[in-house]
């Protein structure tokens, strides 16, 4: 199920005690129809006008205190990571525009539907300069269930100077929004030092917060990824690169060989693709040769089939 792309967008409102069914807030039965007609519309008692009046009333600001913005601004909520924050600090209180969506609670499937719609609309609101904020009743750990799935895709590139890995990194970047929307963290690891990683990140470009360097190939050894001259240059699986020739050309338009590791033996390392749910490995694929990358559509499908905790 698609969820809000970033946990930073999601905030938590602590539950309050609920009035008993006998209180004035929750009358023992619904009001009778004539009473509803009188309170909702003074123009007519016909059903169509009642419905119209109800919709107008639901979207009206006239029922709220003129200072409601200042009052709400002093209310504190929690980010999904557990940090307390005031409403007034969530957007510019002088010139900013914000949409504040209050969900029922994080376990409501209707609210997951709303959260999905909000996520799909976020780019459109962002382009209009509007801050999108979702608040739900529950604790931060409940918000995290909606915002994240505890899943990660770990893509191990060969090395930062490999043109085929620039192609893979470009595809990962293009797919990042889709993985984010599914609550899946995308992690790319390459052989080389951090300065080599920065070359790829700056020239491709690629988000630095998703890119990691493994100069000693420790992760590659732990995962038992292939290494050697034959797999690097003569493996039949490398022919798949020809099927992505146009994408490869586009990805390497700013390529530089300076991103190649100083330890030239590292260029014989092959990569792989892995999906984790927490500590559990749910998908594993070792690259057979240079350019033999896992299809990202298949990886995404695997992520979507893993049940939410």
Image: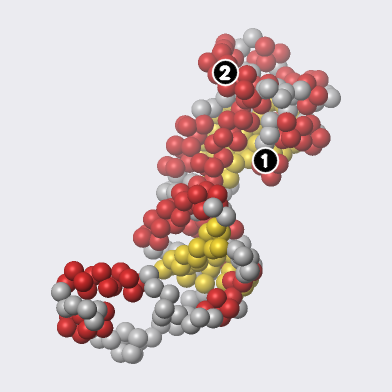
Pinpoint residue 269: horizontal percent, then vertical percent: 70, 23
Kindly identify the residue that appears in the image at 22 percent across and 73 percent down: 50
Closest to the observer: 181 or 58? 58
Quarter assignment of residue 49: bottom left
Q: Give the foreground label among 2 and 1.
A: 2
Numbered badge on residue 260: none
Q: Secondary structure at mark 2?
A: helix
Q: Residues within 10 Å of mark 2 (few under 14, many from 20)?
A: few
Pinpoint residue 201: horizontal percent, then vertical percent: 72, 35
Looking at the image, is mark 2 or mark 1 earlier in the sequence?
Answer: 1
Pinpoint residue 69: horizontal percent, then vertical percent: 55, 76
Kindly identify the residue that appears in the image at 24 percent across and 79 percent down: 41
Numbered badge on residue 246: 2
Looking at the image, residue 18 sits to the left or right of residue 250; the answer is left
- Relative to 120, does residue 169 appear above or below in the rendering? above
Closest to the observer: 220 or 143? 143
Q: Mark 1 sits on what residue?
A: 207
Q: Secondary structure at mark 1?
A: loop
């Amino acid at each position: 199920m698609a969820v809000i792309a970033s946990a930073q967008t999601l905030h938590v409102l602590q539950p309050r005690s609920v009035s008993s069914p006998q209180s004035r807030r929750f009358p023992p039965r619904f009001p009778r129809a004539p009473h509803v007609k009188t309170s909702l519309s003074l123009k007519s008692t016909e059903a169509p006008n009642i419905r119209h009046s109800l919709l107008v009333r639901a979207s009206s600001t006239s029922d709220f205190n003129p200072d409601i913005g200042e009052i709400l601004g002093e209310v504190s909520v929690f980010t999904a990571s557990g940090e307390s924050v005031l409403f007034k600090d969530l957007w510019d209180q002088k010139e900013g525009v914000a949409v504040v969506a209050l969900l029922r609670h994080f376990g409501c499937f209707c609210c997951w539907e709303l959260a999905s719609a909000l996520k799909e609309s976020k780019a459109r609101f962002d382009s209009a300069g509007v801050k999108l904020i979702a608040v739900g009743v529950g604790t931060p750990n409940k918000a995290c269930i909606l915002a994240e799935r505890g899943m990660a895709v770990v893509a191990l590139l060969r090395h930062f100077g490999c043109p085929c890995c620039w192609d893979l990194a470009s595809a990962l970047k293009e797919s990042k929004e889709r993985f984010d929307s599914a609550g899946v963290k995308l992690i790319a690891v390459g052989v080389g030092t951090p300065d080599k990683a920065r070359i790829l990140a700056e020239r491709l470009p690629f988000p630095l917060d998703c890119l990691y360097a493994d100069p000693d190939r420790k992760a590659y050894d732990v995962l038992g990824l292939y290494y050697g001259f034959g797999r690097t240059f003569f493996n039949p699986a490398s022919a798949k690169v020809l099927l992505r020739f146009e994408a490869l050309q586009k990805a390497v338009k700013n390529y530089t060989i300076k991103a190649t590791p100083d330890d030239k033996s590292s260029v014989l390392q092959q990569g792989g693709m892995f999906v984790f749910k927490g500590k559990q490995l749910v998908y594993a694929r070792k690259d057979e040769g240079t350019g033999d990358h896992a299809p990202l559509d298949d990886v995404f499908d695997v992520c979507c089939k893993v049940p939410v905790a």
